[in-house]
Amino acid sequence: MTFSKSEGHRGGQEPALDDEDILAHLGYKQHFQRKMNTWSVGAFCFSIMAILGSFATTLNFPITNGGNVGVVWGWFTASCFATCVSFSLAELCSSMPTVGGIYYWSAHLAPRRWSPLAAWVTGWANLVGQVALICSICSAIADEIADAVTIASDFQVYYSSSALYGIMIAVLVADGMLSSCSTRITARLNYLYMAVNLGGVIALIIILAVLGPKNSASVAFSKFENNSEWENKGLVWILSLTAAMWTLTGYDSAAHVAEETSNAAHAGPIAMVSAVVGTALTGFILSIVHSFVMQDPSRLLSAGLKIPAAQLYYDVMGKHGCLAMWSIIIFVQFTSGAAQTLDASRALYAFARDGAVPFSHRIATINSFTGTPVNATWTMVLFTAIVGLLELQSTALTALAGTSVIGLYVSYAVPIFLRITSGRNKFRPGPWNLGRAAIPLGIISCLWVSFIVVVLLFPANPNPDASLMNWAVLILGVIFSGAMLAWIVSARHWFRGPIHEVEWNDKEDRQCDMDTARFDDEVNSKKPDVELTDFVA
């Protein structure tokens, strides 16, 4: 594996081939203001994954499916494989730093004949995952707020499903408003989001370690407890992977803000990998701490609160301490929703810019005041509100979590698969690349996605009725069937994949010959400066 840099990117110097030229080389004009850097993009990715809020929200999955073993080793296993996927995506992000991200890479790496179809499938899979992820985050916030009210009322007040949907819509609208702000504002907000997230994690770890009861190491790391209806222990533990997989999504956001990022070919991949590794490690520490503190996992599930972690914190901290910590968790989850809504709006904007969705011209409009795709933002809010009707079902979070992970990870796997197959000779490595490790990591990533997609379609109960059904199957089936039907009937006749707003060989607009040569010499042909084996050895 290699990480290479061109001379022009060292020591804070200006890159030899600037961001606007690279974007023009990819076929697009510069529409956004580049107000983000490596740190703000990293904070953005980290905020979407929001380890503090996401871990607490999804603790019910490993508690139900494996107990202590599910909490610790479910997280460890899933996070290792998700990190492999992030490395493969980061290489693509460095090579082709454009807001289109996932689907643009698929179009570029696919055989010419299949390029439009590859872009179409990848783009729609990503959009489905984006909407479901926003919806699941806002649904989780509604559940968290409801639990806070229940605890504050001494377990006297419980919200109905319709009330939860109303809370979800209010949160969604607030997220939409924040996501409509200018890039300068959102870049600064990301620092606040990350600071509160990390501060909350540190506080929670200290409080649980000091005040919580202590299990033995053998219990914390090896006690298996099946609180599900499934009998096969292997399958039960596999279902615990849902928690980590839902948390470790959305890091493709580094690509979706590439056109708002300075030195994007470096900043994007570094931010993506750093955020995923940081989230994975932080989550593993939280897993161990929670596993030592949990005394009776089954009681947490039957306590009456929507999120078992709230009951755990209530037991350890008492009413007021729990409410204080829970308020921080709600805020962190809210910031996750705001960051994810921004990410989704950029994904929709890019797809609309290439004419792939209805009313593309209106959706792919940059607001003259904010300099951001406000129409795309509120389009995503609208569709999320519709999908959010699942909040009326008791298994809403399970269905939305599964849908978001499947949609996003399928869209991740397509360009990775093309990178290691038909696109091997077409791929031009960027300044951050995997070298010889690209193929094995790509194979691992694709196999993992194939496996986890099947897992996430399982219901929580082997004999589910309508109220216990994993509706991810229906959601994905309807949307993907609709997308393919649209392709067969209509889109295959007019959709050609990514458009070209700029012709790179237009010498009036770009110094093509000189810049292309510099791009080839400095980015693609230079020997790597750092070998990963130097660190491993």
Image (cartoon, rainbow, N blue to C red):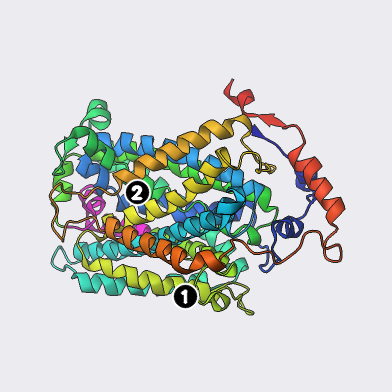
Label 1 secondary element: helix
* Up/down of 55 relative to 294, above or below: below
Q: Are marks 2 and 1 in contact (CB under 8 Å)?
A: no
Please rate how many residues cluster around mark 2, counting C-alpha atoms within 10 Å: few if below 14, some from 14 to 19, many from 20: many
Mark 2 → mark 1, Cα distance in angstroms: 28 Å
**Residue 482: percent from the left, percent from the top?**
38, 65
Please name whichever residue, 200 or 55, is drawn nearer the observer in this view of the structure. Answer: 55
Residue depicted at 26% across the width and 32% down the height:
220
* Up/down of 428 relative to 112, above or below: above
Please, what is the dominant secondary structure of the magenta stretch?
Answer: helix
Q: Is residue 519 left or right of residue 300?
A: right
Label 2 secondary element: helix
- Which badge, 2 or 1, comes first in the chain's sequence? 2
Q: Quadrant of residue 469?
A: bottom left
Residue 359 in view of the camera: yes
Q: Is residue 59 left or right of residue 343?
A: left
**Residue 343: percent from the left, percent from the top?**
51, 62
Q: Which residue is mark 2?
A: 55
Say what amino acid the circle numbered 2 marks.
Answer: Phe
Q: Is residue 360 left or right of residue 484?
A: right
**Residue 370: percent from the left, percent from the top?**
61, 75
* Up/down of 427 relative to 365, above or below: above
**Residue 365: percent from the left, percent from the top?**
59, 76
Say what amino acid the circle numbered 1 marks.
Answer: Trp
Please name whichever residue, 149 or 78, is drawn nearer the observer in this view of the structure. Answer: 78
Rendered image: mark on residue 65: none
Q: Quadrant of residue 63?
A: top left
Q: Quadrant of the C terminus?
A: top right
Residue depicted at 53% across the width and 47% down the height:
415
The magenta stretch is: 305-330
Q: Which residue is mark 1?
A: 378
Is 235 magenta? The answer is: no
